[in-house]
Image (cartoon, grey):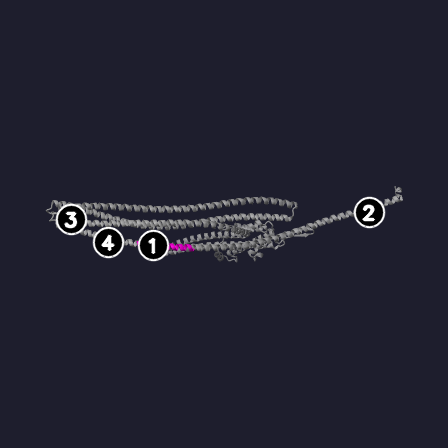
């Protein structure tokens, strides 16, 4: 193919066929791996650069020259677009197909052809890799030609080292010609589309100028109302344009997101392919992990036992907590009793106040008697003075009693405050002790596990290094044995098998330790989660206890408010007493004036009666008010007691429900753990069965390989024995020849001796001299 090949000969071929033919030509050469890697990298991109690189690679690997300098120069003169690495820098399908009249394929069709070619290239690469694997995995066959031993040519050599097909070069040239023709047609389509675009832009400018002129004319001719409507429409159009711009920005963001997602999908595909390639290693690792899981289950049982012990300790702590709550309830009841005693004392003081009021009424009656018989009964006045002193003493006694009651109330309030503070401190100390004990236990467990893991890792690493040294020593011994050919082949195979078993055991131990480490980390996270859950439960219990404490505090506050109201009433009665005392002093003064002005007493008697009647009316009104207030207080106390009883009943009901729910939760948890253990056992059985099947398959593969190697060894041994037979036959033939010569020499010597003996008997030896 020294002449140039015309384009029209290869016009009917598809691009995928051309690229496959080119790859078939490239596979004839031996130095092909770097070129195939470059083609694989370039096939992922699309554009002018990829086509140029592919053309250069294809021409470089062809034996005969092809005149592509002009085509490459024309391609390099084309200015690259912004997205040349990602897409072809040409107009869209609508413009190119509408403008171009030549029967050339569209850009989208070419992109589809290129995608087909990419798929075919990847298939070829995959086939090539599979053939390489088959070539390295398949045993080398031996054949004997004229007494010499040669390896037989395999299918790989037959496929990639035959150079008899001359049509492959012809097909590569057709592929290149078709690609160049496609690029030229696309370039012409792009130029025509660009010219059409320029024309359309010019037409757009002319139309816009005409529209502006017509709009100006219409604005001059049409009235003001139309102009206003136009302004409103223009504002709406501006708003719509703003909305359009926002939507365009959103569209750009979505496009960026789509590009990022495509990149992530490509990476995921690569990861999936990598996982498929390393599937057997992962299966071996899984088998090792299942063996380690069995050990971890045993350790899990130990951990569950420790967890059960922790739960027992927690139950004891909860029992102590409930005892403290009961003690606090008893103290609360005692405080309620003290409050009741204080209320009884207040009732007694009220009764004493009533007695004083009755005494005051008695005094009033005595004052009336004095007014009637002032002139005649001085002795009665003296008696009244004595009674006045007695009433004063009684009032003083009542005041002392009130002061004592105030002191008692104050002491009770201080006791209540102290009890609240003690409850808070006891609760806080209990919570701190629980948390500290739990944290200390967790830290000890974690530190112990970490130290165990570190020691185990160090021992395993030391064993691994020792076994590595042992392996190196064994390798050197094996090489010496092979070079000297002194040790038999079977012993070497046994040693290699032992070394492999030791290596596999080391790998399994390392993987088991890694899995154990991961399991320890997982257990640590689980323990932390359980601790958080338990902490949340304890906090909820504390919150409930706090709520109960708040309710108790509210009840105590209500009792305090009642005490405050009672103290206010006592103050009010004291004020009334003071007023009465003032009135009494005023009456005493009046009596003195009456002594001085006895003459005017009879005249002013009627006025004093009226005043006295007014005071009596006011006292009755006060008594009515006091009775009404007492009734209201009794009603409020009864209603609050009823509310307390209902709340206590609800509280007991809620406690019973909580206990029932806790029991149901424990039962469900036990069932879940049993089901989980069953599923884990089934999974372990399945994994062990799979591992047994996998080991059987590996043993079968090893037996097949051993069979092939033994066949080759026996063939070589037979050939070697044949050579030794030939050598021994040659040596035997030489020995036979030597024996024949010796026999001939012996015959000649015997004949000479016989002749000599005959000559001695005849005496001819003398004559012959």
Which of pointers 4 and 3 indicates the residue nearer the eye? Answer: 3
Q: Which residues are magenta?
A: 641-664
Q: CA distance from mark 3 to mark 2?
A: 198 Å
| Sequence order check, earlier mark of 4 and 1 | 4
Marks 4 & 1, CB-CB < 8 Å contact: no
Rendering coords of residue 126 (x, y %): 56, 53
* Residue situated in front as seen by the camera: 575 or 375: 375
Q: CA distance from mark 1 to mark 3?
A: 57 Å
Give the residue drawn at x 82%, y 47%: 747
Q: CA distance from mark 4 to mark 2?
A: 173 Å
Residue found at the far left of this picture = 599
Which of pointers 3 and 2 indicates the residue nearer the eye? Answer: 3
* Residue situated in front as seen by the camera: 125 or 195: 125
Which type of secondary structure does the marked residue at label 1 adopt? Answer: helix
Disc number placed over residue 647 in the picture, else none: 1
Which type of secondary structure does the marked residue at label 4 adopt? Answer: helix
**Left or right, residue 285 beside residue 743:** left
| Sequence order check, earlier mark of 3 and 2 | 3
> In this figure, which residue is indicated by the disc labeled 2?
747
> In this figure, which residue is indicated by the disc labeled 3?
367
| Sequence order check, earlier mark of 4 and 3 | 3
| Sequence order check, earlier mark of 1 and 3 | 3
> In this figure, which residue is indicated by the disc labeled 4?
628
């Amino acid at each position: 193919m020294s002449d140039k090949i015309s384009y029209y000969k290869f016009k009917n071929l598809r691009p995928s066929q051309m690229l496959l033919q080119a790859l078939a030509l490239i596979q004839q050469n031996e130095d092909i791996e770097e070129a195939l890697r470059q083609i694989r990298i370039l096939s992922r991109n699309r554009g002018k650069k990829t086509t140029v690189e592919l053309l250069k690679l294809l021409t470089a690997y062809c034996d005969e020259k092809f005149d592509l300098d002009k085509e490459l120069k024309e391609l390099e003169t084309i200015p690259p677009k912004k997205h040349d690495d990602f897409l072809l820098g040409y107009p869209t399908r609508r413009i190119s197909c509408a403008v171009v009249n030549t029967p050339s394929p569209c850009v989208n069709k070419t992109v589809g052809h290129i995608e087909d070619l990419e798929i075919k290239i990847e298939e070829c690469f995959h086939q090539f890799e599979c053939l390489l694997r088959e070539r390295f995995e398949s045993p080398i066959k031996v054949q004997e030609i004229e007494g010499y031993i040669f390896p037989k040519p395999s299918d790989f050599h037959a496929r990639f080292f035959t150079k008899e097909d001359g049509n492959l070069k012809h097909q590569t040239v057709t592929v290149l010609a078709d690609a160049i023709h496609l690029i030229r047609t696309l370039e012409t389509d792009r130029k025509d589309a660009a010219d059409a675009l320029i024309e359309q832009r010019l037409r757009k400018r002319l139309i816009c100028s005409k529209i502006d002129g017509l709009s100006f004319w219409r604005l001059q001719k049409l009235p003001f109302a139309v102009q206003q409507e136009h302004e409103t429409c223009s504002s709406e159009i501006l708003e719509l344009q703003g909305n359009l711009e926002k939507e365009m920005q959103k569209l750009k963001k979505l496009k960026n997101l789509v590009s990022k997602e495509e990149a992530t999908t490509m990476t995921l595909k690569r990861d999936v392919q990598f996982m498929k390639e390393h599937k057997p290693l992962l299966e071996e690792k899984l088998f090792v992990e299942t063996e380690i899981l069995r050990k971890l289950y045993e350790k899990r049982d130990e951990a569950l036992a420790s967890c059960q012990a922790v739960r027992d300790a927690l139950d004891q702590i909860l029992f102590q907590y409930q005892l403290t709550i009961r003690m606090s309830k008893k103290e609360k009841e005692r405080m309620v009793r003290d409050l009741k005693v204080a209320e009884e004392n207040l009732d007694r003081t009220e009764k004493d106040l009533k007695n004083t009021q009755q005494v005051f009424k008695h005094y009033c009656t005595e004052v009336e008697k004095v007014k009637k018989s002032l002139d005649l009964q001085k002795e009665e006045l003296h008696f009244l003075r004595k009674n006045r002193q007695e009433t004063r003493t009684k009032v003083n006694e009542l005041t002392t009693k009130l002061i004592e009651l105030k002191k008692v109330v104050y002491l009770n309030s201080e006791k209540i405050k102290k009890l609240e503070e003690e409850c808070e401190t006891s609760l806080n100390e209990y919570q701190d002790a629980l948390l500290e004990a739990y944290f200390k236990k967790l830290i000890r467990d974690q530190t112990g596990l970490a130290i165990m893991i570190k020691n185990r890792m160090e021992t395993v690493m030391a064993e691994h290094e020792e076994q590595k040294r042992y392996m190196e020593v064994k390798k050197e011994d094996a090489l010496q044995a092979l070079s000297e050919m002194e040790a038999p082949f079977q012993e070497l195979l046994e040693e290699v098998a032992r070394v492999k078993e030791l290596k596999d055991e080391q790998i399994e131990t390392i993987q088991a330790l890694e899995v154990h480490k991961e399991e320890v980390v997982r257990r640590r996270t689980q323990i932390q989660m359980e601790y958080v859950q338990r902490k949340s439960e304890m906090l909820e219990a504390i919150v409930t206890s706090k709520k109960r404490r708040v309710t108790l505090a509210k009840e105590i506050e209500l009792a305090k408010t009642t005490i405050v109201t009672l103290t206010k009433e006592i103050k009010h009665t004291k004020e009334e007493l003071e007023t009465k005392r003032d009135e009494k002093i005023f009456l005493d003064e009046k009596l003195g004036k009456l002594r001085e002005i006895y003459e005017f007493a009879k005249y002013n008697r009627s006025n004093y009666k009226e005043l006295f009647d007014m005071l009596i009316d006011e006292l009755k009104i006060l008594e009515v008010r006091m009775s009404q207030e007492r009734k209201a207080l009794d009603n409020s106390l009864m209603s609050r007691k009823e509310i307390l009883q209902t709340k206590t009943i609800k509280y007991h009901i809620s406690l019973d429900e909580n206990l029932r729910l806790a029991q149901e939760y424990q039962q469900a948890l036990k069932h879940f753990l049993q089901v989980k253990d069953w599923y884990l056992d089934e999974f372990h059985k399945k994994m062990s069965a799979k591992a047994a099947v996998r080991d059987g398959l590996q043993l079968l593969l090893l037996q097949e390989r051993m069979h092939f190697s033994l066949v080759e060894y026996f063939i070589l041994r037979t050939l070697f024995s044949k050579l030794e037979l030939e050598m021994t036959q040659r040596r035997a033939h030489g020995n036979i020849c030597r024996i024949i010569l010796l026999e001939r020499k012996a015959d000649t010597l015997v004949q000479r001796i016989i002749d000599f003996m005959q000559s001695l008997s005849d005496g001819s030896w003398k004559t012959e001299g």
